[in-house]
Image (cartoon, rainbow, N blue to C red):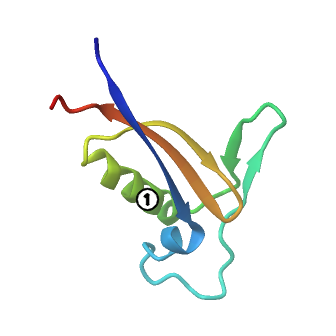
Amino acid sequence: MKRYEHAITVHQAHEILGRIPEHPADAAPPMVYCTSQGECFFDNAPNPYIQAMVEILNAQGKQGWILVQVVPREQDMICFWRRNQSKE
């Protein structure tokens, strides 16, 4: 039977924005909108924001973690991960 280990990571807005090259200090980050059914989306988010988030997610993926769910919030995003538990 497969066994998994789990992790939760929280990534603050400044961590995401810090990955965007030449980010103007006065530019407001895009807004995340969520419906009452739990569907969330960016409103006209520029590609650099999405690319910065992808870089963060890929960093965990390179360590063998599989993204189970991401919860975008106003000032951060919470990621739930799993990976095969190593046999010792």
Q: Disc count in the image?
A: 1
- Residue 58 in the image: above or below residue 20: above
Picture quadrant where residue 86 is located: top left
Picture quadrant where residue 64 is located: top left
Residue 25 image offset from top left, x and y in percent: 60, 88
In this image, 83 relative to 40: left or right? left
- Residue 40 in the image: above or below residue 56: above
In this image, 49 relative to 65: left or right? right
- Residue 13 in the image: above or below residue 22: above
Q: Residues within 10 Å of mark 1 (few under 14, many from 20)?
A: some
Viewport quadrant of the C terminus: top left
Residue at the farthest right position: 36
At x 42%, y 79%, the residue is 21
Label 1, secondary structure: give it.
helix
At x 59%, y 69%, the residue is 13
Residue at the farthest left position: 88
19 or 3: nearer the viewer: 3
Residue at the farthest top position: 1
Residue 72 image offset from top left, x and y in percent: 63, 51
Residue 57 image offset from top left, x and y in percent: 40, 51
Residue at the farthest front position: 88
37 or 65: nearer the viewer: 65
Identify the amino acid type marked 1: Gln
Residue at which label 1 appears: 51
Viewport quadrant of the N terminus: top left
